[in-house]
Amino acid sequence: MAEAAPDMFAALRDTSGAPLYLRLKKTIEDAVRNGVLGPGDALPSERDIASKADVSRVTVRKAVQDLVRGGVLIQRHGSGTFVAPRVERVEQSLSRLTSFTEDMARRGMQVRSEWLERGVFPPSPAEMMVLGLSSRELVARIGRLRIANDTPLAIERASLSASVLPEPTAIGSSLYAALEKTGHRPVRAVQRISAANLGDADAALLDVPVGSASLNIERISYLATGKVIEFTRSVYRGDTYDFVAELRIPEPEAAR
């Protein structure tokens, strides 16, 4: 980057009138997009950038913080600021009910999970309401960090009646595969998607800066009988997932 720095920062001397920190931010973004800076490359120190760009260190800090929040850069305590690894985006259909394991396998991606929680517990009020449980019944919970090609993509927290899943510790790589063996695999689901910013704990699990964008999905899955079988709350990295839904225009009433 040392040789490219003069050319990179020349754009800051334009007369566009845009704030300096936005011009600096765009300069670094363009360098990443055009391959001048590659994944894992270190940025010069705040002092060096300020000197080369002829701006204040406050301006540099503001531009860099914006890029960290946007996932373009990452900061490692005691090491410096680096270009974030390039993450392949995953496109997922909202019209098919598949497991994470099945979905990633179709893409040829290597999948693994890290268990966050696995056991039988008294149900929460939300679990009682959605799963139709009484306060005397128990709920099986499994929480996993889902990882594909060594990149953490999602946090999944599923709840089911303990009568359906009495031994959650026996679950292997796929919950749906285990449910299929007992005749409890869901056939349809209703999902609610919302946007959010990641807090400390989830950001650490997904290896992204605090405040990064996420897509939160609450899914209620049903058996063919109409009985609720699964209540899952998931957090997906906003920089890796595109959710796609097919929409159909209904036929006009007169044509029916």
Image (cartoon, rainbow, N blue to C red):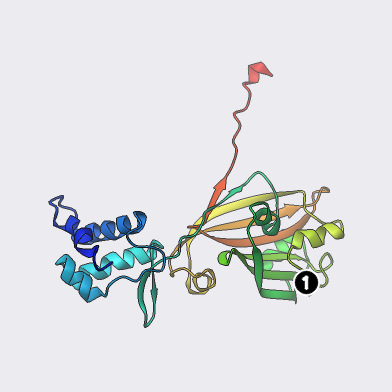
> What residue occupies the far top of the structure in this picture?
254
The N terminus: image quadrant: bottom left
Q: Quadrant of residue 24?
A: bottom left
Residue at the image point whose x is 59% and y is 57% from the top: 217
In the image, residue 56 lies at what x, y percent?
Answer: 17, 70
Give the left or right position of residue 84, taking residue 169 as reference: left
Give the answer, above or below, for where 206 lies relative to 191: below
Q: Which residue is mark 1?
A: 168
Tell me: 254 left or right of 229.
left
Q: Mark yes or no: residue 82 visible.
A: yes
* Residue nearer the viewer, 167 or 38: 38
Residue drawn 60% across the image and 52% down it: 192
Furthest residue to the right? Answer: 182
Q: In x, y percent, where is residue 252?
A: 62, 21
Task: Please give the count of numbered marks on the rendered protein.
Answer: 1
Q: Give left or right: position of 233 versus 85.
A: right
Q: Where 102 sits versus 144, above or below? A: above
Between residue 39 and residue 90, name the one nearer to us: 39
**Camera-side residue of 223 and 94:** 94
Mark 1: which secondary structure? helix
In the image, residue 158 above or below residue 81: above
Can you name the residue that lies furthest to the bottom here?
78
Amino acid type at circle 1 is Pro
Where is residue 47 shown, x and y percent of the image? 21, 76
Quadrant that contains the C terminus: top right
Query: How would you rate the neighbour count of disc 1 (Cα within 10 Å): few for under 14, some for 14-19, many for 20 or more?
Result: some
Residue 169, located in which quarter of the rendered image?
A: bottom right
Q: Decide if residue 138 is in sight here.
A: no
Q: Position of residue 84 (x, y in %)?
A: 42, 65
